[in-house]
Image (cartoon, rainbow, N blue to C red):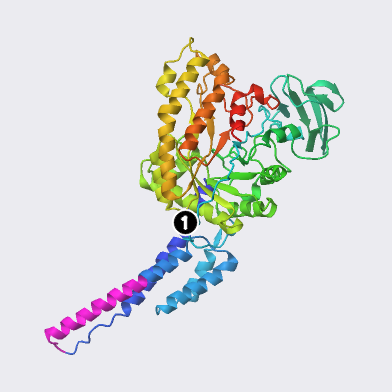
Amino acid sequence: MGSHNMNQDRNRGPTMVVIGLLLIMLAVLLSLIPLPEAKGQLPGSVIDDQIGQLQERQEALMEEMQEVQASIAALNVAMWSDEGALERVAILEETMSDHGIHMTDEASATHIHMAWHEGGPVIPPIDPDPPIEPPIEPPVEAEANINLTSPGYWQRPWTFNNLAKHMDLWRSNGTAFLFWEAGHAPPGRYTMSWDGPGSVDIVVAENRQGNTFEIGDQGVMLRRNGVVTNLVIAKADWDGSTFNEVYLDTLRPFGSFRFMDWQLTNNQQQVSWGTRTTPANYRSGRVMPVEYMVELCNTLGKDPWFCMPHLAGDNYIFEFAELVKETLDPDAKVYIEWSNEVWNSKFSVYHWVKEQAGGEDLGHHDFYRVWAEESERTFRIWEQVLGADRVVRVLGAQLANPDVGDRIAQAAGGKFDAISPAMYFGITGSEQRDLDANTTPADLIALMANNIAEENTPDFIAYGELADEHGALLLAYEGGQHLTPHGDGSVSWYQAYIDVQSHPLMEQLYLDNLAAWEAAGGDGEWWYQDVSRPSKHGAWGHLQYQDQPVGDAPKMKAILSNN
C-alpha cells in the first residue's frame, strides 16, 4: 500500500508542476498578442488584414508553446536529484527564455522540492528517447541457461555451505527446521555455533555429540533459548566459502542464471532499499541478498537475469543497479525484466497494473501502457548505471497468447532488446479432464508430443516473426514440461504424472520442443528450474535432488545435450 502511494506521488508531483507552468506560459503567450487600438471605425479590408496577422501570430506562438511543452516533458521524464535539479532548472529557464518567458525563483524552488522521492534524492533523468541500439547478438554457441530454485528448509538444492542459511525463520515456539529428501541430504558431520547470551538445543538430528550432528531422514529440529545471533551450521573444515561445491558443479554447464525465485518476485513486497535482506540477516523464506546473486555469477563466470519488483521505486532500482555495477564482473551482461508474468492474474503485479490502468485488464490498451512505462523506467535506470552495452532489456510475454507479446512490444515502442515468452509443453485442460487411473506415462508422452506439434510450434513461429519485426532477440524466460495436477495429489492419474518425469522418452520431448523453438528463431532459453522434486504443485526440477546423476535425469540430460 505504501509503495503504491509512493508511485502515485512520483507521477503526480512533477505533473502538477508542469501543468502549472503551462498555464503560466499560456497566459504570458496570449498576453503577447497585440490587440487593435479602438481609434474609430476602420475599413473592413484593414480589419481583415489585422485579423489575419493576429491569427498568424497566434499560430506561431502556439507552435512555440508546444516546443516549450515538449522541452518540459523531456526534462520531467524522471525525478531529479538534488545535484541535478539546479542544472535542469537552468536548462528549463534557458529554454523558456528563448521564447520570451521567464521562470520565477519560487517556481525554481518548487521544482527542487519536487526532486525528492522515497525519503531521499533519486537518480537524474536520461534521454527518454536514446538512439536505438543495434540488437544484442546471442552467443555464437549458445549455452543452456537455468532458473534457480530458491533455497528453503523443505527444498532440494545444497546451495550454501552454512546450512543455517537454509533454515526457516525461528517460529513463535523457538523452533526451526531443516529437511531434505530421505537419503539426499548434504553428507557429513556438521558443527553448530552462535553468538549471543542465548543458546540453541538440538531436538532432532542423527548421531548427536554436543553441538555436532549429521542430517538424517528425519531432518533437523533446533530450539532457540533467548537471544541468538550469527548461527552457523557447517562442517568442521569449512573454509568460509559461501556455496556448496556439489551445487556449483551442477551449475557450471549453464551460461546464465535467472533469479526470479531467489528474488521471490511473484507477490514480492520488498520495496525499500534500506530494509532489504543482506548476507548478515538472510534466512530461507527471505529475498536473496544481491551480494549472493552476484557472488554466484562471479564464482562461475555467468550472466545474471534480475527481475525488478513491481512496487520498487526509482531509488531501490538505482541502488540495486549500483551495487551490481560495483561488484559484478565487468565483462558480464545483465538481463533485466520488470517483475514476472505481468499478464498472469495469479500474481499481484497483474492487479497492480490493472489498478494503475484505471481498472482496465489485459484486453485493453491502458494495461499495456502502464506495463510498458514501468518497464521503460526500469530499463532507463539500469542503462544509466551500467551502460546500454551491458544491459539486455527483456519484455516478458505469454506463450499461449502471442497477441499479448505483440501488444506489449507495440506499447514499448522499440525500447527493448528481447521479447520473451516461455517455452513450456504439457497438455490442455480438456485433455487433463479425460485422464483417469488407467492413464500411463506413455499416454502422457503422446499427449505432450501432440502439444508441441499443434500448440507450441505455431506460437513459436508467431513470436519469431514478432522478434524479427522489432529487430529483437527471442528469449524464453522459462521452459520445460508443464504437467501439474494443480495442487491435487489425489487425482487418479497422479502416479503416471510422477513416473513420466523420469521416463526415457521425456528427453526426446525436450529435444523436439527445443528444435521447434530454435527453428522459429529462438536465441536462448532459461529452463525452469535446477533442483526440486515432483509434488502436487508441479514437477519443475530438472534434477529431483542435488546428487542425482544426470544419466538418471532425462530432463537435465536433454537440456545439457544441447550445449
Up the image or down, 112 lies above or below 537; here it is below
For mark 1, give the secondary structure.
Answer: helix
Query: In the displayed image of the protein, which residue is found farthest to the right?
Result: 210
Q: Residue at left 47%, top 53%?
A: 415
Question: In the image, what residue type sits under mark 1?
Answer: Asn
Secondary structure mostly seen in magenta is helix
Percent x, y of residue 259: 61, 40
Residue identifier under label 1: 11
Label 1: few (<14), some (14–19) or many (≥20) C-alpha neighbours in 10 Å: some
In terms of image quadrants, where is residue 146?
top right
* Front residue of this view, candidates 11 and 399: 399
Of residues 476 and 159, the one nearer the viewer is: 476
Question: Where residue 145 sits: x, y (%)?
Answer: 60, 38
Magenta-colored span: 40-65
Q: Determine if the magenta segment contains residue 60.
A: yes
Q: Residue at x 47, y 33 (%)?
A: 516
Residue 59's x, y, as percent? 28, 74
For this view, does 271 lie left or right of residue 279?
Answer: left
Going 41% across and 29% down the picture, which residue do you hit? 455
Camera sees residue 189: yes
Q: Residue at x 55, y 71 (%)?
A: 86
Q: Is residue 115 above or below residue 34?
A: above
Asked if residue 400 lies in the magenta stretch, the reply is no
Report x, y in % for residue 80.
Answer: 54, 63
**Looking at this rendering, what residue extends furthest in the top direction?**
438
